[in-house]
């Protein structure tokens, strides 16, 4: 792509970032830190996007992310701007990382303590315990080899067909599912599930998710699962604080209404306050929603409205945010119930698009680690059930209350007794709410699915291939959904913008 010279040489290049989610905030910070003139427009009146908080009556919940993994990437971003992430946000490493309760019978407390973990596995299947160390060792090698892919902008086939990538194939075995991959170590399906359910972080089934994602569970055991004090929204709040200090101008409550073009080149963004001319536009808003609403269909070549509609999307989530009287101090921070017939539950979500009668659920009981989240003596319970993205089979106006009752019933399977009588505050979010209120395409909370056909150069690219001067950051682009890789997308996008504008943009170390 040709370089763009700023019209007046003395003026810094101007960039407009659309969306104050983690990807948008991190990209804005890196660009402002490099001396660019950065405006960030955000539809809502707060920062953080899906990584913001919900606060009411003395309770504070994370809206979306609750697992903070692999802080290393964000540490690099903070350090390039002269800040120390761990001074800005207190990170507590959790042990146990989470408790799994299997509907098929048995429990497992996932712990980073290797010996204790082997004993936990042995409780489910003695023969599998001895393979835990081999799983870690082989995935350590796999992670080391795959990491560069997460840091490379996949701008075309040329990035894929390199000798390095071809050598990776026998190690990554991309044709395997995560479950197939784990069969190499563990026979007991419950043990496999303990190391594969993490594909749900990408909104996918372990039976379909590409095998290379076995690194997700490895990352937890190797680098830890963290709780940021105040919740994951404390991370995006800190990013916003640091970005402001670096000079980013925030325009909250000011949605982008259109990206402005001259031919195929983006030249600005229109909001209700007028037009902001710029040299580059960064889109952090939900990819499918933003493209179909902010860019005329005729301008797009590969990602037209009809092609986007034909893509595979992740699952959605049914959420209960409960402020309850009393505490559950004998239960851990993260608790996961895995449906008795997990394959059926997954198939209900991804194939049949119906609601399960024995859904898997996840409950965050954060006050055991962080009492600041509720009034004294009370607790917050964040309850998430993975469900189908918006689909004509499920009418949420009709199903909402019945499914709420189903989910509340599931809580007792995790040991949360008598919750219903203790609820003092409650907020529900259905896939229809994600779609209509949070403006997520089809309510697919984890964006485009991470199938092989929608990854690397086949995912919407960080230097967006359909338009000039448009860059993507966040869960909808490469490398994918999940905070560590979203922060990698910010580093990649910032570096590409720097290259195209002819400016050195520090991204906190080599990509
Ligand atoms: C329920 C749930 C649980 C999750 N759990 C985890 C977890 O535990 N760990 C993890 O690592 N990840 C998790 N994720 C995934 C991911 O980390 C988050 O979704 C993350 O917030 C996505 O970041 P993003 O940068 O893509 O932007 P988003 O968070 O999607 O933010 C985009 C921003 O763009 C704004 N916007 C939209 N349209 C416009 C417009 N026209 N003009 C201006 N602004 C606009 C939005 O208001 C929003 O603020 C979870 C996600 C969800 C939904």
Image (cartoon, rainbow, N blue to C red):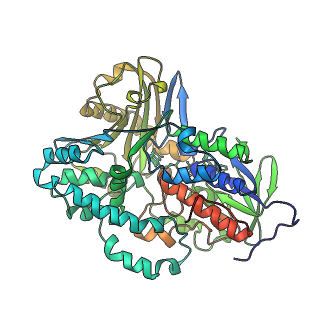
Residue 339 at x, y percent in the picture: 25, 45
| In this picture, residue 411 sits left or right of residue 150 | left
| Between 159 and 476, the one nearer to me in the picture | 159
Q: Is residue 507 above or below residue 244?
A: below
Q: Is residue 403 above or below residue 127?
A: above
Viewer-closest of 312 and 145: 145
Q: Is residue 212 left or right of residue 438?
A: left
Give the left or right position of residue 175, taking residue 38 as reference: left
Residue 329 drawn above or below residue 402? above
The quarter holding residue 136 reads: bottom left
Q: Is residue 115 above or below residue 352?
A: above
Quadrant of the rendering where the N terminus is positioned: bottom right
Name the quarter where the C terminus is drawn: bottom right
* Front residue (pair 297, 151): 151
Residue 389 image position (x, y, % from top left): 43, 51
Residue in view at x 33 percent, y 45 percent:
355
Q: Residue at x 51, y 29 (%)?
A: 60
Residue 290 is situated, as x and y percent measured from the top left of the image, at 62, 57
Residue plotted at (88% across, 65% down): 8
Total marks drawn? 0
| Res. 8 in view | yes
Q: Is residue 349 visible?
A: no
Q: Position of residue 344 (x, y in %)?
A: 25, 52
């Amino acid at each position: 792509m040709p370089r763009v010279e700023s019209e007046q040489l003395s003026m810094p290049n101007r960039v407009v970032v659309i969306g104050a989610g983690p990807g948008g905030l991190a990209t804005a910070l890196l660009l402002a830190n490099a001396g660019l003139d950065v405006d960030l427009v955000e539809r809502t009146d707060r920062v953080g996007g899906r990584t913001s908080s919900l606060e009411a009556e003395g309770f504070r919940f994370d809206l979306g992310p609750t697992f903070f993994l692999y802080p290393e990437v964000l540490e690099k971003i903070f350090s390039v701007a002269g800040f120390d992430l761990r001074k800005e946000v207190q990170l507590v490493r959790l042990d146990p990382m989470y408790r799994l309760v299997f509907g098929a019978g048995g429990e497992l407390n996932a712990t980073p303590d290797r010996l204790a973990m082997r004993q936990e596995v042995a409780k489910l299947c003695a023969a599998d315990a001895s393979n835990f160390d081999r799983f870690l060792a082989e995935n350590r090698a796999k992670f080391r080899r795959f990491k560069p892919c997460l840091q490379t902008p996949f701008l075309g086939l040329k990035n894929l067909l390199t000798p390095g990538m071809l050598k990776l194939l026998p190690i990554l075995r991309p044709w395997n599912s995560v479950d197939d991959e784990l069969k190499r170590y563990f026979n007991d399906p419950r043990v496999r599930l303990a190391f594969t359910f993490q594909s749900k972080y990408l909104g996918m089934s372990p039976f379909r998710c590409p095998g290379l994602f076995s690194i997700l569970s490895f990352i937890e055991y190797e680098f830890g699962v963290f709780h940021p004090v105040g919740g994951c929204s404390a991370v995006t709040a800190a990013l916003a604080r640091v970005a402001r200090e670096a000079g980013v101008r925030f325009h909250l409550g000011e949605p982008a209404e259109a990206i402005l073009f001259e031919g195929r080149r983006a030249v600005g963004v229109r909001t209700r306050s007028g037009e902001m001319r710029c040299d580059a536009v960064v889109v952090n808003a939900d990819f499918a929603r933003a493209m179909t609403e902010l860019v005329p269909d005729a301008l797009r070549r590969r990602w037209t409205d009809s092609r986007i509609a034909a893509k595979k999307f992740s699952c959605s989530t049914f959420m209960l945010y409960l402020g309850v009287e009393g505490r559950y101090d004998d239960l851990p921070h993260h608790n996961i119930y895995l449906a008795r017939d997990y394959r059926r539950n997954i198939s209900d979500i991804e194939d049949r698009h119906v609601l399960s009668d024995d859904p898997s659920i996840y409950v965050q009981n954060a006050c055991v680690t962080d009492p600041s989240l509720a009034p004294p003596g009370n607790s917050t319970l964040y309850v998430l059930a993975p469900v189908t993205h918006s689909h004509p089979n499920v009418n949420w106006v009709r199903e909402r209350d019945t499914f709420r009752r189903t989910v509340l019933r599931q809580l007792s399977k995790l040991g949360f007794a008598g919750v219903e009588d203790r609820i003092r505050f409650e907020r529900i979010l259905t896939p229809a709410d994600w779609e209509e209120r949070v403006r997520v395409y089809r309510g697919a909370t984890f964006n485009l699915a991470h199938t092989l056909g929608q990854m690397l150069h086949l995912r919407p690219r960080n230097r967006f291939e359909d338009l000039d001067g448009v860059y993507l950051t966040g869960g909808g682009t490469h490398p994918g959904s999940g905070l560590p890789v979203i922060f990698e997308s910010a580093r990649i996008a910032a570096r590409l913008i720097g290259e195209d504008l002819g400016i050195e943009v520090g991204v906190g170390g080599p990509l």
